[in-house]
Image (cartoon, rainbow, N blue to C red):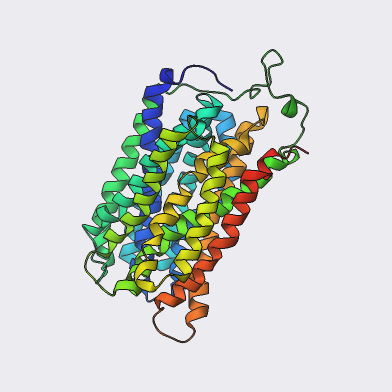
């Protein structure tokens, strides 16, 4: 592990924090577009969740190539390319809106997802290995605050141009020109900034450094069972973290009707996540280890899911804040536990973990079709339909609890 003082990397971490903001902004846009495009194209609930699927499916397609590219050209250049790819994806929204084509929208989202994949594969291991292992969750929590704040800002930004009650696709053209320009600027800025390259213990294969004895004799990334379980944990976690953001506006409509400024309800997801990250910054590792925090928040997720499903409808919506709080420390804790002891396989392992982010496509999509199946022939899904579909959260939290207690310790 890189043991240089964290304060040496204050400026690089600030730069990386901006990148985490951009990643969150992209996900926040998808949460906003899910109900908007459903209205514009008269889609079913399940079909509308293809918006999220298009973004996150890029992670499984481009996850491995992203790891290869980072090994070849390093973190900084990979981040630069990622911004340009994301800019292309945002720009493609313009012809998609002009053509009024849902398939073209999905293509634009997929291209943006490729850029997001490369950026995630670069920034997450960078933050993890840039300082002491025991405080990795703190650094990831700080990045998470930036990331999830952008989740909230993105729909509010687009809400300035789009009326959720009367979606007009032409209205999205101007804001996506703005986003494209910002991404191009960030790509140029990253290219010229002095962002130091960092390496995990044993990553350069040196026999002189104190590297992981566990990793040095391994021949394949698939010889690390704790990593493979970590990939599955990331898959599940990203799915249950994305689900509230992707579904909250629909759930708010079912709970409260067509009230003004529905996009403002997305703040409940962001507030819960940010509060959890603040707790992580304060408490880890001073009062609680990142492993014990993961166990505690998994148990809280189980309890919160039961409340979401079984509380009366007028109260159930607000438990999404508690769900989001439960999710907050999972990524900061799962990631360092999963890449621990990988040595020279760190970049490859990180690309596998990034592929696990495809869970953000799969679980919300399953949820959407569950809602359709539960509501049957009814035209509009009810609160009870959504609450029943949210049962999908329970087995997810139980697996993360298993990884926190036992899975991350497996070395054979």
- From the top left corner, tell me how far across and down residue 338 is, in percent: 62, 39
Q: Residue furthest top?
A: 208
Query: For the point 68% across and 44% down, which residue is it?
Result: 406
Q: Is residue 61 visible?
A: no
Quadrant where the image shows the C terminus: top right
The furthest residue to the front:
287
Q: Position of residue 53 (x, y in %)?
A: 50, 60
Nearer-the-camera pick, 215 or 278: 278
Going 37% across and 66% down the picture, which residue do you hit? 317
**Location of residue 294 (image quadrant):** top right
One can see residue 169 in this view? yes
Instruction: Please tell me which residue lies in front, 167 or 310.
Output: 310
Relative to 378, residue 293 above or below: above
Q: Nearer the viewer, residue 385 or 77?
A: 385
Return the residue found at the far bottom. Answer: 377
Q: Quadrant of residue 92?
A: bottom left
Count the marks. 0
Q: Residue at x 38, y 51 (%)?
A: 272
Q: Is residue 230 left or right of residue 275?
A: right
- Coordinates of residue 247 in the picture (x, y in percent): 41, 64
| Nearest the eye: 376 or 274 | 274
The answer to whether 327 appears left or right of 405 in the picture is left
The quadrant where residue 13 appears: top left
Q: Is residue 170 left or right of residue 58?
A: left
Question: Is 309 drawn above or below residue 153 in the view shown?
Answer: below
Name the quadrant of the N terminus.
Answer: top right
x, y percent for residue 148: 38, 46
């Amino acid at each position: 592990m890189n043991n240089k003082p964290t304060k040496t990397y204050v400026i690089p971490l600030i730069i990386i924090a901006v990148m985490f903001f951009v990643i969150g902004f992209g996900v926040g846009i998808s949460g906003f577009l899910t109900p908007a495009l459903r209205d514009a194209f008269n889609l079913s609930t399940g079909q509308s969740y293809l918006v999220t699927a298009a973004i996150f499916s890029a992670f499984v397609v481009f996850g491995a190539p992203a790891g290869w590219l980072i090994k070849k050209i390093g973190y900084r250049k990979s981040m630069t390319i990622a911004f340009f790819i994301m800019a292309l994806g945002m720009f493609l929204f313009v012809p998609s809106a002009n053509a009024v084509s849902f398939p073209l929208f999905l293509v634009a989202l997929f291209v943006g997802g490729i850029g997001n994949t490369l950026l995630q594969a670069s920034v997450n291991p960078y933050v993890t290995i840039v300082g002491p292992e025991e405080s990795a969750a703190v650094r990831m929590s700080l990045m998470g605050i930036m990331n999830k704040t952008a989740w909230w800002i993105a729909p509010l930004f687009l809400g300035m141009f789009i009326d959720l009650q009367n979606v007009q696709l032409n209205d999205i053209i101007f804001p996506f020109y703005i986003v494209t320009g910002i991404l191009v600027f960030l790509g140029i800025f990253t290219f010229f900034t002095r962002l130091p390259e960092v390496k995990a213990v044993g990553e350069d294969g040196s026999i002189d450094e104190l590297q992981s004895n566990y990793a040095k004799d391994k021949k394949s990334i698939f010889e690390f069972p704790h990593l493979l379980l970590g990939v599955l944990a990331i898959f599940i976690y990203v799915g249950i973290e994305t689900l509230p953001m992707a579904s909250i506006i629909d759930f708010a409509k079912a709970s409260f009707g067509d009230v003004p400024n529905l996009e403002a309800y997305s703040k409940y997801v962001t507030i819960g996540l940010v509060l959890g990250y603040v707790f992580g910054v304060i408490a880890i590792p001073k009062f609680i280890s990142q492993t014990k925090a993961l166990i505690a928040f998994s148990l809280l997720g189980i309890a919160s899911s039961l409340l979401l499903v079984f509380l009366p409808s007028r109260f159930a919506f607000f438990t999404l804040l508690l769900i989001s709080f439960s999710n907050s420390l999972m990524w900061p804790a799962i990631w360092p536990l999963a890449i621990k002891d990988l040595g020279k396989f760190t970049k490859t392992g990180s690309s596998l973990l990034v592929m696990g982010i495809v869970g953000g496509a799969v679980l919300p999509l399953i949820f959407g079709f569950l809602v359709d199946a539960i509501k049957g022939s009814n035209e509009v899904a009810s609160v009870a339909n959504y609450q029943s579909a949210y049962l999908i959260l329970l087995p997810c939290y139980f697996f993360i609890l298993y990884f926190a207690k036992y899975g991350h310790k497996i070395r054979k």
